[in-house]
Image (cartoon, rainbow, N blue to C red):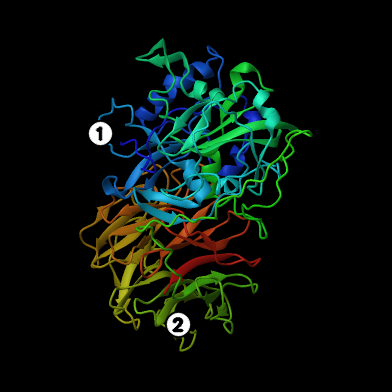
């Protein structure tokens, strides 16, 4: 991996947590959906062991580089990586990445960590060397207790940080001067000359590529030698080699701010680097005065839990009269005009594709299950089955979007019906009381409908009929329950427990050519073909404790976890252009519908009522 600025995932290892109470995000793991996990790759464990194993064993006294334990692992989009994704694993202090699995595993940069600071400050999530997905600058405390409403955030650093080539604020060479700058939550900067008397605040190194200065206290930390584990043995080595391996280059100068630390307000020096945030608290014990912030936790929450959205009315960094951010009562201040607010918009940065079409789904907001439809942004909801008696469920738009197949008990039993997309012209297709006919799905040319039925033996089978209900044929005459059919170009995906638990299979449309796609220890169900029929979304319980969305290729390879929260996510469906997915989640305490890209960006909640909203389909 090259070492150039703003490249993907370079430099990876230093992260110091030390005393967890001193840094933001401590104790937040139960809220982040980011629980302790095993190492996702032996290379990740090797990198962690080098610096942090002796810390965990209590054999050295220093702060963490990564954190006490690995956390969530996932495959995330990266344009240049094989298959377009890379393996990553989160830690309190950073995120480890393998961008090229075929590279030399003995190389220092085989495992890297990402440009997390750049992304949190700019609000642009990097998914390739020059490809970005626009989110928002993170209003998450960059230092101090996470509940400190006055602490500067990553967004506060937008006008003092160089977060893209040619953009942001750069500084002249200040060697021989001292780090006396201050910053507050609004991003306003000033000067506290009394801080020149604090040991280690003299600038020791100037970084030409980014045009920022590093004070001695941080420069010494980045070049420190201590005991590490190499080849299974403790040896005296530099913790970082080269010095920017863990942190990357600085993207801001160092600024003093007054933040709440374990409930007590203290003066802390903060500097933003490409990959980490360093803090200096002179009140700490010497071994823990310099630490790396919990940017791994912050970034995970920003990316996957959508935290850090700035409240309405939050002031942008500007040039208002500056106070010393509470640093010292006797501090003198000087207003320093901030550079213009900038938005990183690389030439190749993708724009968010507008949400179009219609989403139909099942809602209990009227006291029974009805099928509703609305715009994908949540506007103009309409009850399509308002006049029916009994529950309605399992809506599926036809391929041309003109009709909806669905299940209803309006005539006393679960049967398949169709209606126009506006709810008119309802037609009953099946009549097999007391059997249950469920889960209709249209063929690509809308001439046929596959569905599940227990009409023969009491066990569900997959059936196919003409779209007017004629000529029903059983195509899975096999012991076990078969359900959840989804029709691809020439294959039908479905769920069966014939092997002992629910797994996903595909077959030809006449039931021949059976192929099993999943073999996990958990249950897998609800397959949904992408519009080009190359990928399948599905639900899995393979990660203990909750349901997640996964995606795989049509042949069952490259199974990748899409959602990684502590909540349950299910009922996946694709937008017609394949840009978005829609699904059900209880992450906010109630079953609601959400849309997003596969990588978790462009996240949007589209229902907000008190009823349960489930089973979406997208026209």
The residue depicted at 40 percent of the width and 79 percent of the height is 430
Question: How many neighbours does mark 2 have within 10 angstroms: few (below 14), some (14-19), or many (20 or more)?
Answer: some
Question: What is the x, y in percent for residue 434?
Answer: 47, 72
Q: Residue furthest left?
A: 513
Separation of residues labelled 2 and 1 (CA atoms): 52 Å
Q: Residue at x 46, y 86 (%)?
A: 426
Find residue 425 and report its horizontal and vertical position in percent. Answer: 46, 89
Q: Are marks 2 and 1 in contact (CB under 8 Å)?
A: no
- Above or below, 263 against 186 in this view is above
Image: 41 above or below 602? above
The quarter of the displayed image where residue 101 is located = top left
- Give left or right: position of 559 versus 277: left
In this figure, what is the number of numbered marks?
2
Query: Dot 1 lies on which element?
Result: loop
- Does residue 52 appear left or right of residue 10 in this picture? right
Q: Quadrant of the C terminus?
A: bottom left
| Disc 2: which residue | 421
Q: Which residue is mark 1?
A: 103
554 to the left or right of 158? left
Q: Is residue 566 visible?
A: no
Q: Nearer the viewer, residue 185 or 516?
A: 185
Name the N-terminal-most of marks 2 and 1. 1
Question: Quick check: 431 above or below 154?
Answer: below
Residue 225 place in picture, x, y as percent: 46, 15
Q: Is residue 72 visible?
A: yes
Helix, strand or loop for disc 2: loop
Query: Which quarter of the rendered picture does the N terminus lie within?
Result: top left
> Mark 1: few, some, or many residues within 10 Å (few <14, many ≥20)?
few
- Which is in the foreground here, disc 2 or disc 1? 1
Residue that extends furthest to the bottom in the rendered view of this protein:
425
């Amino acid at each position: 991996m090259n070492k150039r600025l703003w490249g993907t995932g370079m430099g990876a290892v230093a992260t110091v947590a030390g005393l967890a109470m001193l840094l933001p995000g401590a104790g937040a793991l139960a809220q982040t959906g980011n629980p302790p996990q095993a190492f996702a790759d032996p290379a990740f464990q090797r990198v962690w062991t080098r610096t942090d194993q002796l810390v965990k064993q209590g054999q050295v006294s220093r702060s963490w580089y990564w954190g006490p334990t690995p956390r969530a692992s996932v495959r995330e989009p990266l344009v240049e990586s094989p298959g377009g994704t890379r393996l990553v694993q989160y830690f309190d202090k950073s995120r480890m990445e393998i961008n090229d699995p075929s590279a030399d595993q003995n190389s220092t940069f085989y495992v890297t960590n990402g440009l997390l600071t750049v992304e949190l400050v700019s609000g642009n999530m990097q998914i390739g060397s020059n490809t970005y997905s626009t989110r928002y600058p993170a209003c998450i405390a960059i230092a101090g207790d996470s509940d400190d409403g006055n602490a500067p955030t990553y967004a506060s650093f937008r006008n003092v940080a160089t977060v893209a080539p040619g953009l942001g604020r750069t500084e002249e060479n200040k060697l021989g001067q001292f780090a006396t700058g201050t910053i507050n939550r609004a991003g306003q900067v000033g000067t506290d000359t009394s801080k020149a008397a604090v040991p280690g605040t003299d600038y020791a190194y100037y970084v030409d590529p980014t045009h920022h200065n590093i004070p001695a206290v941080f420069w010494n930390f980045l070049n420190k030698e201590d005991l590490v584990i190499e080849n299974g043995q403790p040896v005296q080595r530099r913790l970082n080699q080269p010095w920017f391996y863990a942190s990357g280059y600085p993207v801001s100068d160092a600024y003093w701010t007054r933040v709440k630390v374990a409930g007590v307000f203290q003066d802390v020096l903060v500097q933003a680097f490409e990959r980490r945030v360093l803090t200096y608290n002179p009140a700490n014990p010497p071994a823990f005065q310099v630490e790396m912030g919990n940017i791994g936790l912050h970034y995970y929450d920003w990316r996957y839990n959508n935290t850090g959205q700035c409240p309405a009315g939050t002031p942008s960094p500007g040039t208002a009269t500056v106070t010393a951010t509470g640093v010292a009562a006797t501090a003198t201040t000087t207003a320093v005009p901030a550079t213009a607010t900038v938005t990183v918009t690389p030439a190749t940065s993708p724009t968010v594709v507008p949400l179009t079409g219609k989403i139909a789904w099942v809602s209990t907001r009227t006291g029974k299950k009805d099928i509703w439809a609305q715009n994908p942004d949540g506007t103009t909801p309409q009850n399509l089955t308002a006049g029916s008696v009994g529950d309605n469920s399992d809506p599926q738009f036809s391929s041309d979007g003109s009709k909806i197949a669905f299940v209803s008990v309006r005539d006393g039993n679960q049967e398949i019906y169709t209606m126009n997309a506006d709810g008119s012209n309802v037609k009953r297709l099946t009549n097999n009381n007391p059997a249950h006919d469920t889960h209709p799905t249209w063929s690509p040319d809308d001439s046929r409908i596959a569905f599940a039925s227990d009409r023969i033996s009491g066990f569900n089978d997959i059936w196919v009929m003409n779209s007017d209900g004629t000529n029903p044929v059983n195509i899975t005459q096999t012991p076990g329950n078969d359900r959840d059919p989804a029709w691809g170009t020439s294959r039908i995906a479905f769920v069966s427990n014939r092997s002992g638990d629910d797994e996903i299979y595909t077959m030809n449309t006449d039931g021949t050519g059976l192929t099993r796609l999943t073999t996990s220890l958990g249950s897998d169900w609800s397959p949904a073909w992408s519009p080009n029929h190359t990928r399948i979304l599905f639900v899995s319980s393979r990660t203990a404790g909750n349901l997640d969305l996964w995606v795989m290729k049509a042949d069952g390879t490259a199974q990748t976890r899409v959602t990684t929260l502590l909540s349950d996510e299910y009922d996946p469906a694709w937008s017609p252009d394949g840009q978005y997915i829609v699904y059900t989640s209880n992450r906010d305490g109630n079953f609601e519908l959400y849309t997003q890209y596969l990588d978790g960006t462009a996240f949007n909640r589209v229902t907000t009522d008190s009823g349960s909203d489930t089973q979406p389909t997208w026209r």
